[in-house]
Image (tube, rainbow, N blue to C red):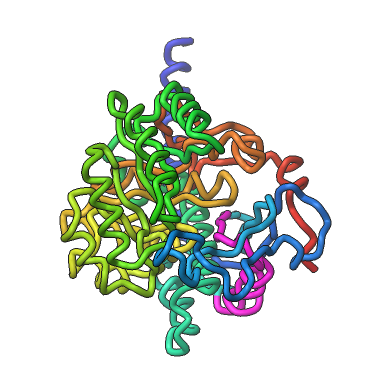
Amino acid sequence: MVAGAAAVSGVGARAQTVVRDRQDRLDAARPLTIRLVEAFVIRNPPTPIPFDDPIEVSPPGSLTGGIGLWNRLDHATPSRFKGYEQAVLVKITTEDGQVGWGECHAPSAPRVHQRIITDLFAPVLRGQDARRINALWERLYTTERVRGYMTGAHFEALAGIDLALWDLLGKAIGLPVYQLLGGVYRGSQPLYRGVGGSTIAALVTDAKVAVASGLQMVKMGYRKGGGSSDLERVMAVAEFMKPHGQVAVDSLGAFKLYEAVQIGRKFDALGNIGWFEDALLPDDQTAYPMLAASLETPVCAGEMLNNRFQFRDLLATRGADIINPDVCRAGGITECQRIAFIADTFNVTWSPHVSTGTVLYFAASLHLALATPNCIIMEGGRKLEGPLGNVLLRTPIKVENGCAFAPEGPGFGIEWNEAALARVTIDAS
């Protein structure tokens, strides 16, 4: 009698499981109707200051400070922010209360991004099915396409929306974003980070700390040219890194073509420069193929580009050996996946650029990195340690021996520590 009851009980349990599975499939097939689109300004430290206070820009007529002909008008130095980090988080809520989170790169004037999201994109999105990520992306892009808003704050705001839609879809059907993208190519993602120091000794010491943490590549700046001090700094780090890996050099668009060729050939002689990044300004794209053809050191570009059409032109002319698009700038996962695939058709590798922002920035980049065949390394070796990193999460993202592991939960797999997030959320009214 007891055995018979157990058998009946087992049959009943299986039947209930079948019913639940069927219900889950039905729920996943229902539209995810968007009810609310919100944007929140994040700042660290969360000082209540005017929004124009952090902005710091070199005065008109500033020179590069190089020697002789290297001392010319400075076109490349960007705005800086007096030690403040700012970003915009995007929250999309459906009619049945499901939520997805995204982020857009917004270190300067974050209320611009916030208003694009709330005043332009939100009316387009309300009432729409959030599962239609590609169609919604195209509609948002087209809102200002004929007016030429294909880059900058408009495209960064679009990136934040796109990430929130991917996160929402993953949570709705119970899968990580990397599974939605087709699954992972590797179990973890190698990382690199920047190194610095006021002296060569301090710079090398920082590189030693990075290597001790498991990193096999570090990055440093080289912007002045024309003198020996900057080159000596690169040489010292390159020499230390030889048994361990490479050093990448980032110039943030500081040089003319002839200058970049002269510098790049010095890097060639060092032998372990991982790449020469953004040697030229983004509006000097026609010079990149000549630079790449002149050097043995790989040329990396893409942080300053925003859409697949710009990358198409760069890649078709063989202007870069490695590209580094940024998911919170270049239209989100939807556009950056296209960019990565275009690069793969040219046998070009890519590395996600991860700039100032929160741990969500890192997580989204990580999911896409793991789900693309030609990703080689990712920026952000110390991103999770800062005040906008793992401290904002209930469960931290795992990093071991210089590699990051994607969270296994649905969507981007992150859950906010609400109290920690509230501390860095700014009233932007």
Residues shaded magenta: 100-124
Considering depth in this image, is 353 or 219 the residue closer to the camera?
219
Residue 160: % across, % down: 54, 62
Left or right side of 81 for 20: left
Residue at (48% x, 43% y) in the render:
410
Tell how many labels.
0
Residue 232: % across, % down: 39, 39
Residue 55: % across, % down: 69, 64
Of all residues, the one furthest to the top in this rendering is 2
Considering depth in this image, is 116 or 37 the residue closer to the camera?
116
Residue at (47% x, 29% y) in the render:
399
Residue 353, magenta (yes or no):
no
Residue 342 seen from this side: no
Left or right side of 40 for 137: left
Q: Quadrant of the C terminus?
A: bottom right
Dividing the picture into quarters, in which one does residue 340 lie? bottom left
| Magenta stretch prevailing secondary structure | helix
Above or below: residue 278 compared with residue 382: below
Of all residues, the one furthest to the front in this rendering is 68
